[in-house]
Amino acid sequence: MAFELSRFQFWLASVLGAYIDQDNFAGAQCWDLHAHFARFFGLPVINTTGGSGQWAGYAGTMYRDYPQTAAIEAAYEQIPASQPGKAGDTAVWGDSFWYYPKTHVAQVIEDVGYEYLRCASQNSSEGRWDNPFPGQSSGPVLDQWLPKKGLLGYLRPRTGLVLQGEIVTAPSYTLDEQFLLNLGLTLP
């Protein structure tokens, strides 16, 4: 029997609880979750490399140096922190708040208009016993309420990406099997 999920809900279910390392560098960092999201939806990945000075190599450069390329400008629009976030936005924080000592990036799940955003976030919680990157990264991808304090803004997909309510009819896989396939693993 086939199941139906929105693409965003499917993506979220496939990453929650996982340690995502897209670049095989420095473990499962917050940026790796953005890279996974962008690749899943066919968007260009916004890198943290380049730039200089404050935040060079950190997530804050994603917003500060926007747009890094013409492809990124065509795919995302820069939204100020004063505007509400939307599901699928890439939220970027600076380092002006103790919670994010070296900037942070997460994918917005919802913004209910208060001082917190509900996000899919990685490397923003305590590590678990099964952390495959001890000493490099902390917690796995979690559904978290993160403070808006220190938020630089959002990078919102322009592509007409429908995240809520889009129906995807998948083959007859269980959710566990589909999760393994989405990670690029073969079924037992």
Image (spheres, rainbow, N blue to C red):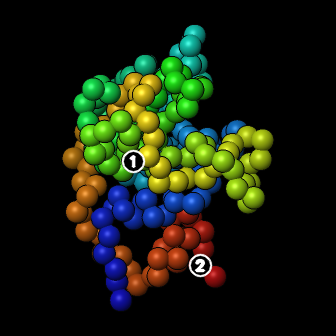
Of helix, strand and loop, which one carries label 1? strand
- At 26% from the left edge and 50% from the top edge, which residue is drawn? 161
Q: Amino acid at mark 2?
A: Leu
Residue, disc 1? 118
Residue most extreme to the bottom: 1
- How packed mark 1 is, by other alpha carbons closer than 10 Å (few <14, some 14-19, many 20 or more), is many
Question: From this viewpoint, is residue 72 visible?
Answer: no
Residue drawn at point x = 34 percent, y = 41 percent: 89
- Pointer 2: what residue? 187
Image coords of residue 33 (percent x, y): 52, 46
| Separation of marks 1 and 2 at Cα, in angstroms | 32 Å
> Which residue is located at x 39 percent, y 65 percent?
10
Q: Nearer the viewer, residue 86 or 44?
A: 86
Q: Position of residue 27 (x, y in %)?
A: 69, 44
* Disc on the earlier residue, 1 or 2: 1
Q: Is residue 45 above or below residue 98?
A: below
| Horizontal side of residue 132 vs 104, given as left or right | right
**Numbered disc total:** 2
